[in-house]
Image: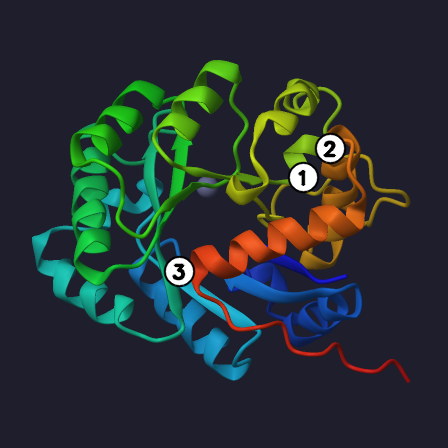
Amino acid sequence: MHWIDIGVNLTHDSFDADRDEVIARAADRGVTQLVVTGASLAGSAAAIALARRYPGRLFATAGVHPHHAHELGPQELPQLRELLRAPEVVAVGECGLDYFRDYSPRAAQRQAFEYQLQLAAECGKPLFLHQRDAHADFTSALRSRGRAPAGAVAHCFTGGDRELAAYLDLGLSIGITGWFCDERRGAHLAQLVGRIPPQRLMLETDAPYLLPRDLTPRPHSRRNEPMYLPHIGAAVARARAETPEDCAAHTSAHARAFFGLPQAPESRPRG
Ligand SMILES: [Zn+2]
């Protein structure tokens, strides 16, 4: 079984001491390809540098998260455009709107989001989208542009049936994280995940965040890792009444087509 983690914050400093081991552990569990999230200009450059060390296995996004939206003005656009040209970059983002935290003023968030919608149209790469408590502004920004030519994925989907219907109607793919495994906050997703067509569904850990709550034993560090993706995949498969093998196959096939990834490398033989 091959799994693809489409959202992992591997440049996060919690991985500084053992990043290569984290990548090796994931590969040992069949998580053979990872898309490293870029959330700022510096973070995107770091994600690209990391992806370059693992050709065919690690890829990167380049973009500015709504939390950092105030860092993206007109004078930064050439730099982001340049990052997006890197062959390791398979998506524009993480970008979108976050009115839950409001770390950047909302006007700045909307402007940075507009810039990145425009850059995605220019560079022909898909969008990696973040939305929290901003559904109306988010969907209206997407709708006013029409369908993203190279597609878009709403990462870490945690919404309800109305949001899911709106996203599917907009042509978005849906990223499901270990939030799904949280019996307090994620139970409603079990009802919804069966409504996502297989050619629209992808899986992600969002590591080091969102450690699945039902892991046993629970790691002391509480740090999430891409090696836990098959755990999320098994829970999603159960809710969709399909086998983990089928879930791995169709989520990987969609991720590969969506991001334009090469075939998965053979897993390393275990000694
Ligand atoms: Zn996010």
Quick check: can you spot residue 208?
no
* Tag 2: amino acid: Cys
As helix, strand or loop, the secondary structure at mark 2 comes to: helix
Sooner in the amino-acid sequence: mark 2 or mark 3: 3
Structure colour scheme: rainbow
Give neighbour class at mark 2: few <14, some 14-19, many 20+ (Cα, 10 Å): many
- Where is residue 35 drawn, in percent x and y? 51, 61
- Where is residue 263 drawn, in percent x and y? 58, 72
- Judging by the rendered image, the residue that carries numbered circle 2 is 181
- Residue labelled 1 has its Cβ within 8 Å of some atom of ligand 1: no
Q: Quadrant of residue 75?
A: bottom left
Q: Is residue 45 above or below residue 99?
A: below
- Disc number placed over residue 97 in the picture, else none: none
Q: Nearer the viewer, residue 239 or 27?
A: 239
- Disc number placed over residue 61 in the picture, else none: 3
Q: Is residue 187 above or below residue 42?
A: above
- Judging by the rendered image, the residue that carries numbered circle 1 is 178
Q: Quadrant of the C terminus?
A: bottom right
Quick check: can you spot residue 268?
yes
Give neighbour class at mark 3: few <14, some 14-19, many 20+ (Cα, 10 Å): many
Q: What residue is at 8 percent from the left and 53 percent from the top?
A: 74
Task: Locate residue 4 relative to residue 69 in the image: left or right.
Answer: right
As helix, strand or loop, the secondary structure at mark 1 comes to: helix
State the CA–CA distance, disc 2 to disc 3: 25 Å
* Tag 1: amino acid: Gly
State the CA–CA distance, disc 3 to disc 1: 20 Å
As helix, strand or loop, the secondary structure at mark 3 comes to: strand
- Where is residue 104 drawn, in percent x and y? 27, 36
